[in-house]
Image (spheres, helix red, strand yellow):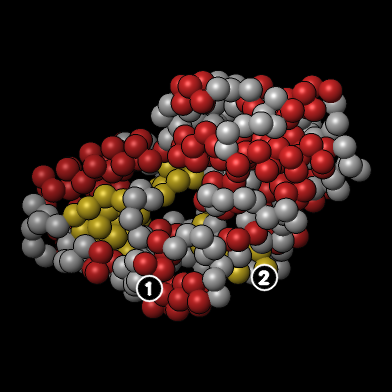
Amino acid sequence: MKGSEDYSSLASRIKAWAKELGFQATGISDLKLSGDEAHLDAWLAAGRHGDMAYMARHGHKRSRPAQLLPGTLRVISARMDYFPPGITGADKILGEACAAYISRYALGRDYHKLLRNRLKHLARRIDKAASSTTHRVFVDSAPVLEKALARNAGLGWIGKHTNLLSRDAGSWFFLGEIYTDLPLPVDQPLTSHCGSCSACIGVCPTRAILSPFELDARRCISYLTIELHGAIPEDLRPLIGNRIYGCDDCQLVCPWNRYATSTPETDFLPRHGLDGAHLTTLFAWSEAEFLHNTEGSAIRRIGYLRWLRNIAVALGNAAPEPEVITSLEARASHPSELVREHVAWALGHVSLEATPESPILRHLSSIREPTHE
C-alpha cells in the first residue's frame, strides 16, 4: 500500500471494522509520550506504585512503544463500553454494610480475552488489506500507557482521577491497543473538560487522589484489594467499607458518567449474583467454589486467600450481627496466617462503634448509572 490517500482510506476502514466488532470508538496515535514519561518517572520515584515492582522493571517500554515492539510507528486504540444493564444500583449496595461491593467491570466475564480476541480479528483484517509486517495486540498484557495513547488518539482526556474520560461514554469502558508499523494518519487529542470539578478527589474514601492527576496507588482501594499481596494496612481497613474487589467511587460521582450508556455485550452481565451478594455467603465459599464461581472472571486473579482477606475486612466493617460474628469465627483458625490476621482484626473491629459513613453515601443524588439505550 502506498500513498497518503490509501492510508487515510485504510484508517477509515479500520474504524468501521472495529465498530462491526463491537468497539464503540477507535483512534490512531503516534508515539509521542515524553510528557507522560516524565510524569510516570516522577510517580515511580515517589514510590506511589507500591508493591507493583514490575512497573519500574519495565523501564521506558511503557512510554516508548518502539522499545516494546521494534518497528512500531502507530498505535490503534479501541474502546469498548462495559457497564452492565439492569444491575443492582451501586448506591444500594454501598448503603448496605453486609452486601458485597464488586467493581462494575468485574461482575461478568474477564474482559482481557474478549477484547484480545476482537482486536486480533481486527489486526488480521488490517494485515489482509495492507500486508503489515509488524503488529501486536495488547489488553493489559504488557507495559503500555493505554490511557495516554487513547488520549492522543482522540478517544478522550485523562481526568483528575487519572481515568480516561469521554464526553459520550464517561469512563465505563475498557481499552485495547494494536501496535503497527503502518504509517496511518493520526487523530487529534481532545482537550480536557473537567473544568473546576473535583468531585472525584473529594469522594475517594482513602484520599488516594492527592491532587488533580496525582494518584497514590498505595492508598487506592483497587490496589489494596487486587494488587496488594500481603496485609492491608490497618489504618485503611475501616475506610474500605464493603468493597471486596476494586472501587468505583470516583467514577460514580463523575458528572460525565451521566452520559454513559450500558454495554450491549452479554458477556459483561453479572455472574453468580455478584452484584450485591451477601458478604457471609461469599465468605463461606470453599476454594473449589471460589474457583468454580470465578471461572472466566477477572476476580480469579487475586486467588482464594486474598478473596477471604478482603471479605474479612468488609465483615469487620459491617454491623455486629450474629451471622457476621459466626461467619468470622468459622475462619478464625484458617491455615493461612494472612486470613487469620484479618479475621482477628475483623472480630475486634466489628463490635466497635460503626465505621464512619463513606463519602460516597453523601453523594447518592450525584449517582447516575447508565441505562441501556
Residue indicated by mark 1: 33
Residue at (58, 33) in percent of width and height? 335
Q: Can the viewer see residue 188?
A: no
Q: Residues within 10 Å of mark 2 (few under 14, many from 20)?
A: some
Image position of 350 (left or right of 142): right
Residue at (60, 43) in percent of width and height? 338
Inter-mark Cα distance, 2 to 1: 22 Å
Note whether 58 is above or below 339 in the view shown: below
Q: Quadrant of residue 361?
A: top right
Q: Which amino acid lies under the numbered mark 1 shown in the image of this protein? A: Leu
In this view, the mark in front (2 or 1): 2
Closer to the camera, 216 or 366?
A: 216
Q: Which of the numbered marks, if any, corresponds to residue 190?
A: none
- Residue 173 location in percent, x, y? 49, 45
Residue at (45, 39) in percent of width and height? 301
Image position of 218 (left or right of 299): right
Note whether 345 is above or below 73 in the view shown: above
- Residue 256 location in percent, x, y? 62, 52
Residue at (17, 42) in percent of width and height? 125
Image position of 344 (left or right of 152): right
Quadrant of the image for the N terminus?
Answer: bottom left
Residue indicated by mark 2: 211
Image position of 313 (left or right of 106): right
**SS for dot 2:** strand
- Residue 281 location in percent, x, y? 66, 22
Q: Quadrant of residue 334?
A: top right
Note whether 309 is above or below 64 in the view shown: above
Q: Which amino acid lies under the numbered mark 2 shown in the image of this protein? A: Ser
Quadrant of the image for the C terminus?
Answer: top right
**Label located before the other in sequence (2 or 1):** 1
Q: Marks 2 and 1: CB-CB under 8 Å? A: no
Closer to the camera, 367 or 35?
A: 35
